[in-house]
Image: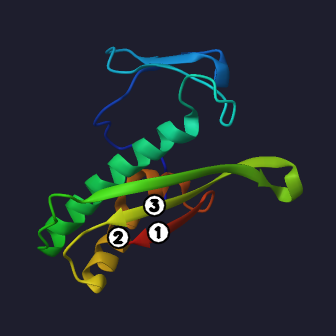
Amino acid sequence: MSNKLDQVLYTAHTHTTGGREGAGRSSDGAIDVKLSTPGTNRPGTNPEQLFGIGYSACFIGAIEIAGKQLGIKLPSDTAIGAEVSLGKTGGGAHYGLGVKLKVSLPGLDAAVKKQLVETAHQTCPYSRSIRGNVDVQFEIA
């Protein structure tokens, strides 16, 4: 399977300076953030937080698509809490990420929730992009 895009639907343009102690902004001005290293208590966000928000938003979209395909009406208060962990792998030689998505689909049957999450995980662009490289776990409520 090729990873090359057949059709580009959207391209985000961002500019970052200074790495983890710098700043980042989007070309449209919607995002303009100061960055800081996790655990330093300095003002700003970090790449792990931004990844968690992006992945969660994308995954909710994938759940919505799965719901339409499966004929399941999603609760209006569908939500995802993300835990993105930065750590060491390969005996401490490399950095890696771990993700836990806490998916809240109130009022739906447990089997339906599981089916929606499994279907979304197969189609979500973030899930597909990191599959095999990032340990992704789900907590479904």
Q: Is residue 17 above or below residue 119?
A: above
Q: Residue at x 20, y 58 (%)?
A: 77
Q: Quadrant of residue 135?
A: bottom right
The residue that disc 1 covers is 138
Q: Amino acid at mark 1?
A: Phe
Q: Residue at x 28, y 37 (%)?
A: 9
Discs 1, 2 touching: Cβ within 8 Å: yes
Mark 2 residue crowding within 10 angstroms, few (<14) / some (14–19) / many (20+): many
**Viewer-nearest of discs 1 and 2:** 1
Alpha carbon of mark 1 to alpha carbon of mark 2: how far?
A: 8 Å
Q: Is residue 110 above or below residue 16?
A: below
Of callouts 2 and 3, the N-terminal one: 3
Discs 2, 3 touching: Cβ within 8 Å: no
Residue sitting nearer the eye, 130 or 102: 102
Circle 1 — which element? strand
Residue 29 spot, x, y in % from top left = 34, 14
Q: Quadrant of residue 5?
A: top left
Q: Residue at x 87, y 49 (%)?
A: 93
Circle 3 — which element? strand
Q: Amino acid at mark 2?
A: Val
Q: Residue at x 21, y 77 (%)?
A: 108
Residue 2 spot, x, y in % from top left = 49, 53
The residue that disc 2 covers is 117
Q: Amino acid at mark 3?
A: Leu
Circle 2 — which element? helix
Residue 84 spot, x, y in % from top left = 56, 50
Discs 1, 3 touching: Cβ within 8 Å: yes
Of callouts 1 and 2, the N-terminal one: 2
Residue 81 spot, x, y in % from top left = 41, 55
The residue that disc 3 covers is 101
**Viewer-nearest of discs 2 and 3:** 3
Among all residues in the image, which is located at the extreme front?
41
